[in-house]
Amino acid sequence: MTPVSRPLKPGVYAPIPTFFVPETEELDIQSIQAQVVRVAKAGVGPLLAGTNGEGIHLTHAERIEIIKAARSALDDAGLVDVPLIAGTGTGSTRETIELCKEAAEAGADYAITILSGYFAGVLATHKRALKAYWKEVSEKSPIPVLIYNYPGATGGIDVDSDLVTELAEECPNLCGIKLTCGNVGKLTRICATVSQTSFAEKYPRKNPNAPFLVLGGFTDFLLPSIYANGHGVITGLGNIAPYTIRKLYDLSVDTLEDASLLPEAQRIQGIVARADYTVAKSSIAGTKYLIEKLYGYGGLPRKPLPPIDPEDATALWNHPHVQDVIALEASFGALFTYSRHYRVSACWRDEQKSSVGTNGASSKPDIPGVPYSSLTVGVPLEIYPNEHRVAITPKNAEVLLKKGFARVLVEKTAGAQAQFPDEHYRAAGAILVDKDELLSSSDILLKVRPPIFGVEAEKVKEGSTVISFLYPHQNKQIVDALAERKATAFGMEMIPRISRAQVFDALSSMANIAGYKAVLEAANHFGRFLTGQVTAAGKIPPCKVLVIGAGVAGLSAIATARRMGAIVRGFDTRSAAREQVQSLGAEFLEVQVQESGEGAGGYAKEMSKEFIEAEMALFMEQAKDVDIIVTTALIPGRPAPKLITEEMVSAMKQGSVIVDLAAETGGNCAVTKPGELATYKGVTIIGYTDLPSRLPTQSSTLYSNNITKFLLSIGGEGKFNVNLEDEVVRGAIVLHNGVRLPPAPRPVPPPVVAPPTTPKEAEVKAITPWQKATREVAAITAGMGTAVTLGKLTGPAFMSNFFTFGLAGLIGYRVVWGVAPALHSPLMSVTNAISGMVGVGGLFVMGGGYFPGTVPQVLGALSVLLAGVNVAGGFVITKRMLDMFKRATDPPEYNWLYTVPAVVFTGGFLAAASTGMAGLVQAGYLTSSILCIGSLSGLASQATARQGNILGILGVISGILASLAAVGFDPETLIQFAAVAAMGGGIGTIIGRRITAIELPQMVAALHSVVGLAAVMTSIASVLSNLDHVSTLHLVTAYLGVLIGGVTFTGSIVAFLKLAGRMSSRPLALPGRHFINSSLLATNIATMGAFVTMAPSVPAVAAAFLGANTVLSFIKGFTTTAAIGGADMPVVITVLNAYSGFALVAEGFMLDNPLLTTVGSLIGVSGSILSYIMCVAMNRTLTNVLFGGIGSTAVQSDYKIEGQITKTSVDETAEALNNADSVILVVGYGMAVAKAQYAIAEIVSMLRARGITVRFAIHPVAGRMPGQCNVLLAEASVPYDSE
């Protein structure tokens, strides 16, 4: 056999989907070819007609046609060395061999085979038959064969590592295996054998260009597999993000030599792994949908496979994992077309009929424009007098080349005066030429100043594009000369001032520099310090500076003068400038005439005669007092307004300075000489028109960024296209193919709308002292009267517990409000642990010796078991969270010392109990209650939070000890309790140690369910254990305990499933759900009455009613929580936290146990307060939440959305962060999903190293439970005092 000409190399391969024409389901060859070439260009090898390519749905002829078309497309694209792998499996041995031969004849270089699941019943356990299959196929195939091991697609046929090793040794025409079994150990074992040099020497391949490769089937462990000597991956995600997968592979290999690359490889691996998992779950239909969205082709699977459901499609596209990998793919150079619709409907199929060509392939719309690869960009030397700037820096020359432009020509020495030498341009890939060659060869000419008439304008390439400052009204000759050359011309000064165009706004960039330089020039010509000083030689007063016009230049001048210590005053006709001026520490001057100067496009408008007269009077007054005046006033399309008259200049003090930034358009000062430095009656007037050019390096850098981003915005998708419907393009264009276009109309400022008057009846009037006093007295009277009524209608037992409940609730209210918001997650965790005292109720019904002997005793033991899980898991999780907040600079802690009070209390309690109980039980309850209150108080700050967790542990221990003393177990039952509690504690500890910060919300919900179920069991057991002597209060509270506990149990399970992604996060909209919930609640109430009345006389019927209550409460917990969307789960968790507390209160009333009443009240109040905080943050009402109304539509207030949204890119964000003085990061659920806290921590560290202040703003509902984002940031060692 002749060696294959295209070697099979380690790397990344993608199973290409087979695309079909809608309706006919014929092959869409054009799309298949486009996909093959696209992934191959990204460095990913194509695999055709495999399982992802619906190979089972293809005829032999169709497989051949696909392979031939792919080979042809690769060759035509110049990718002749890219090998083709063809799927040849899922049939009999005979058919597989036949498919291998056909694939080889069609142009495939390798085959990959998978067994049919039809034979799984026999072959899954028949190692000899499996070995015979691949041995015969490989021996008779004309091309090397790869084994495809995918138990999920073959009914469980899973080849073990021993068989693979045997096949690799005995079958020289086998060239590798794809492992989609997820068995990392198997991959490691196989690699350990076949990667050895001795293996290749001892077992040579039939073809030396086809070594035995071990390839993963998913990308979720690509990086680790490289460290196990793996050879790469065959992954369906390669169709969506080929550049990303290839980058990950290359980076993974490079980490073997350079460990510093490992963090970046790990970051990409995390994004890819999550995306691979999410996309794989959507099957072939989901992959095709994403390809359709990104590249405009994809279509549907072949029947009987169904298309993806539209709702699932939207959810898949919007999934954070998918969006993360798409963003990463774009950053590596992928070009997306972003199809707007996934075409699965009949309407789409009808539309497609008109676009299907005669060959059966659908035609693709051609994106208009000229490809970058056909264009040359030119950057000449600026020859305008005193112009030192250059249009493009070396950095942006490199950017343009990376974007695909054919060449970037730079005139020799073009950047020399801006400190950008020729060698820097040459290193960036630019070509250095002379002016004549540059002008004649450049398709796009980038300049700062307009092309000089008579020197440059007439020599530009015919039909080319010129982008520069142009000022067409002042440079008519230049525009006419460009028109004769059929040029397209853009004026950088004409870019509209809208949010999207901020990054192109060169006027603002230059104005910022001009304002800064204006103050420096003024200080240079002013004869004194700008700042005031007190010296031994005398007092020096500070300089007074007036800045007229608070635009970009004016604000820059104000900021610079303030930094230099001057007293600064600012004036602007626009009222909106007041706050900006004052924020910089300057005084804002105003005139008495009320008139707004807001004009179109962010400029000031021309003012009325009355306003101008008042304004001039103000300027005269200021001219007599100030030392420096900086004027910046411009009106688009008109000469600059004259604001400083000769009379005003004459009134200024000797040695004063005026800097006229409007000199180029005539000047704001009557005696300004544009471009010159003049003196008039002892006052220096600076009329320089080249202030930005006097800081050439900075100016060139900013201008280069502006013009580069503007150029890349003209068109897109790698093509240059002048779209006159684009607001920015239309606003900036002057000539289009030599035709002069009228200026685009400036946006008219919105009319001033008077604020709506508040209706008189809605006005809140202050109450009189008499009204205030009477209302307070009425409230107190009502409260005292209610207490008397309750005392009369109930009994001592109820009032005793109600007394405890009220005081504990009041204390809890005061304590929980003091908990730091950053510690709300630990608060929920510690209250969860304390709520494990629900098991105390189980203590009172345990019995039977070593093993429970009755149903109530079994329920009591199970309640203690569940409580043990809750207590141990809750405290372990709390400790782990709080340890994350610990900093290296925190003082040492001696937590082990807290064993002293634990030992003293336990020893003293047992010693005292041995001589008689007296009031020991009540003392234990008191100690436990106070410690639990102290536990919550400790969470008021990070400094005391860990102490609070320890106090909670001591509180639970003392409470259980006192309860054991109250029960008085015999030794056998005590052993039963210890065993059950230890078992539950062990399970809870394991769970608490294994849980990650990202999994906290669902784990908290799971622990809530444990409390609810324990409450149900305890309540039922307490009734069944002593039904003859049970009181009405006991029956009512037991019934309520079952009701609240049941709702908490199933509601928490639903919350857990939604948060863990095991249940759809969409609300379950049951028909008539409000009627269902109301009916369930009404039935609960009705059965309670029957239960209470029949329990003593007809126990069996009463037990049936109690059982019905249990079932109804379980159903109600499911229906109310399932009707809530995933976005509302943070509120659900806090509500369930409150429910678990109230279930504990019911148990306390039932057992007449003040400890349970106190602890339950604390937890109920804590959960209610957190619910209230969350509801306020989400514009909800607490009653709406507590009574299951979250799923209903909330009434929203009319909020006015203010401000503007600015779209940005990664590069722009990085630049903004680097140039900032203070940064506020707003984090949310996206950080949790992407595990971005580590990347954020690194960014924070880098910014702080540069002296930049970094803070965090965290919304109460950010994340999936209160305070989760704080915990995640703490996990990444972000200091908590930043939040």
Image (tube, rainbow, N blue to C red):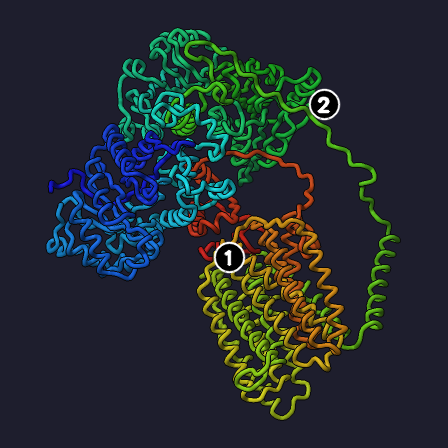
Of the residues shown, which amino acid type is indicated by label 2?
Val
Position of residue 329 relative to residue 738, above or below, is: below
Callout in the foreground (2, 1): 1
| Residue 816: % across, % down | 64, 62
User: To which quarter of the image does residue 465 belong?
Assistant: top left
Residue located 13% across and 46% down the image: 208
| Residue 754: % across, % down | 73, 29
The earlier-in-sequence mark between 2 and 1 is 2
Query: Image check: 1222 left or right of 569?
Result: left
The residue that label 1 is drawn on is 1271
Position of residue 442 relative to residue 1086, above or below, is: above
- Judging depth in this view, the residue of 1063 and 402 nearest the camera is 1063
| Residue 57: % across, % down | 34, 41
Residue 1084 can be seen in this image = yes
Residue 394 can be seen in this image = no
The residue that label 2 is drawn on is 593
- Judging depth in this view, the residue of 730 and 392 nearest the camera is 730
Q: CA distance from mark 2 to mark 1?
A: 55 Å
| Residue 634: % across, % down | 56, 19
Query: Image check: 882 left or right of 174?
Result: right
